[in-house]
Amino acid sequence: MDKVFEKILEIENRAKEVYAEAVQKKEQIEDRLHDDIKIRKAEITEMTDAKIRQLVLSGEKELQEGIERINRKLQEKLMQLDEQVSKCATKWEDIIFSNVIGD
């Protein structure tokens, strides 16, 4: 009978050891998972930041190109107006002179 109790105690002790090992393994796995999650989070954050920087630069480039297009069109319009003014300047001078003089 004592041998049976000893065997039961051995089994119980072994079961406690196995359980303790399982708990330890579980904690190790959880720690590794937390570390992996931190690493992945850092990688994703870096990729996201890089993409944001790329989009900002792209947006700035598009904005600059748009401003340059607008400035070119403005310059073209101003040149056209200058040409029209030059063409009509003498005519307008004559009209103004006539209106002032009263001819």
Image (cartoon, helix red, strand yellow):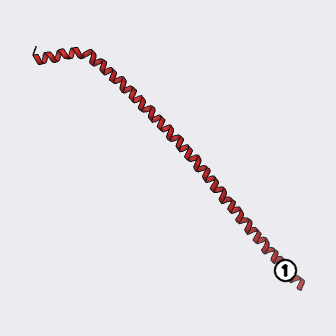
SS state under label 1: helix
Q: From the image, which quarter does the N terminus lie in?
A: bottom right
* 12 or 86: nearer the viewer: 86
Q: Residue placed at 34% from the left, 24% from the top?
A: 77
**The image quarter in which residue 17 lies:** bottom right
Q: Indicate left or right for 28 with 68 as reference.
A: right
The residue at which mark 1 appears reads as 8
User: How far across and how far down the image is residue 50, in percent?
Assistant: 56, 44
User: How far across and how far down the image is residue 93, in percent?
Assistant: 19, 16
Establish if 18 lies above or below 36: below
User: How far across and how far down the image is residue 20, in percent?
Assistant: 75, 71
* 77 or 11: nearer the viewer: 77
Q: Indicate left or right for 89 with 49 as reference.
A: left
Establish if 11 lies above or below 37: below
**The image quarter in which residue 2 lies:** bottom right
* 48 or 15: nearer the viewer: 48
Establish if 73 lies above or below 92: below
Establish if 20 lies above or below 29: below
Give the class, few, some or many, for how many residues have Cα within 10 Å of label 1's Cα (few <14, many ≥20). Answer: few
Q: Residue placed at 40% from the left, 26% from the top?
A: 72
Q: Residue placed at 59% from the left, 46% from the top?
A: 47
Q: Indicate left or right for 44 with 11 as reference.
A: left
Q: From the image, which quarter does the C terminus lie in?
A: top left
Q: Residue placed at 71% from the left, 62% from the top?
A: 29
